[in-house]
Image (cartoon, rainbow, N blue to C red):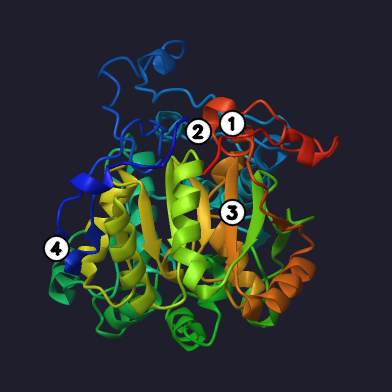
Amino acid sequence: MATARTANPTSVMGLNKPANGQLKGQPKPANLQSIPSAAAQQPAGPQKGNTDSTDDWKKCLQLPPKDTRMKTSDVTSTKGNEFEDYCLKRELLMGIFEMGWEKPSPVQEESIPIALSGRDILARAKNGTGKSGAYLIPLLERIDLKKDHIQAIVMVPTRELALQMSQISIQLSKHLGGVKVMATTGGTNLRDDIMRLDETVHVIIATPGRILDLVKKGVAKVDKTQMMVMDEADKLLSQDFVILIEEIISFLPKDRQILLYSATFPVSVQKFMAKHLKKPYEINLMEELTLKGITQYYAYVTERQKVHCLNTLFSRLQINQSIIFCNSTQRVELLAKKITQLGYSCFYIHAKMMQEYRNRVFHDFRNGLCRNLVCTDLFTRGIDIQAVNVVINFDFPKSAETYLHRIGRSGRFGHLGLAINLITSEDRFNLKGIEEQLVTDIKPIPSSIDKSLYVAEFHSVDPDDDGGDGEAKQKELGAA
């Protein structure tokens, strides 16, 4: 039976540099599936001289391995459009296809033509259904290389998401011949950002505090910026950020275009829309909140049983990569240490770590150097790591919104995933409340879990098929 174990407990190495969030048994998990990751793919560009042929340019593309995993209707129930239908520059199409993006997802079909027309957008779609491409593609298409000012700003709530978006933007635009993309976030050297802005920058991807600082200093001149995107808009318009966002908008021209993307739209977003958006085109692809490909279970435990339960899950499940959530930074570090002592490779990440270490952990986990990542809710927003097939709530979240974003780290872009919640007696009412708010079903964990629900090579069950008894699909994986 394939398991999540990556090191024999008797041969575990000592804790390696705990300050950088990397607690390891063996650093690289065996048999980690090679799943194409959009931002991690760095294929070489097509051979020069061949892109002018109207017939042969696609043959010159350096395409990543084809992703053959089953996808759910969250991303497959499209109108049948192709990326070529939107009259995009060929050089941008080359970047799109070399990312492994074959056809637009539903949110991309709705968003791309409207964004290209210059109209404001309010888009509500599930996590992991292609929202990034929905705004980055039209944004890059509209960049005018003859103009050397900042033409677009992408606002995101976390530093890790800013880095991810900048990597995707650079990959998409690599054939466009000179689109300059810059990521700027708090926790990095302000002087480096100031020096970078002395040169031409077309697109800035930023967290609100840092971009506002640069704008106020007169370094980032946004008076000619034509487009502002707000990804994870519900978080950006929470009390933590909304004052900063309002101030940033005051520096933008009156005829700017604003695009809002989020999975949830609380009252704060609606107020902002009424104040700042001009006749926005509204996209709502949220008939249900949770992703169809994610199977959700809970295990009823006491606090003292949690680590033992986690150990049992590791031994029984076929984990490609997992993200394990705790409710505090202290518990993140303690749990990461425990997991390492049990003999499993483990990184950890939280907001109190130095940015340099956060970046290193994020990069290494994304590249498959470790199978398990323990983290706080810092890692719930927009982070897209395709290899993650299991999310475990070691501490159950307090709100439905947090729960939704946490489990959305698995089952990315229509693939299948597993979410397991460790529930104590204090959590049981919260569990019921979240089930009701999200209109979803979180079932008691069975003695065995069918691999076809969350392991790529076993995807033989259609996740959108509601017919049949779910319990009958369970197969015995062996005794603990």
User: Relative to 379, is 268 on the left or the right?
Assistant: right
Q: CA distance from mark 4 to mark 1?
A: 43 Å
**Dots 1, 3 in contact, CB < 8 A:** no
Task: Classify residue 205 by image quadrant.
Answer: bottom left
Q: Amino acid at mark 4?
A: Lys
Q: Residue at x 63, y 71 (%)?
A: 401
The kind of secondary structure element at disc 1 is: loop
Type of amino acid under label 3: Ala
Q: CA distance from mark 4 to mark 2?
A: 38 Å
Circle 2: element type: loop
Q: Say which residue label 1 marks.
A: 103
Mark 3 crowdedness (10 Å alpha carbons): few <14, some 14-19, many ≥20:
many
Question: Residues at badges 3 and 4 in contact (C-beta under 8 Å)?
Answer: no
Q: Nearer the viewer, residue 185 or 406?
A: 406
Which callout, 3 or 4, points at the residue further toward the start of the chain? 4
Nearest to the observer: residue 379 or residue 126: 379
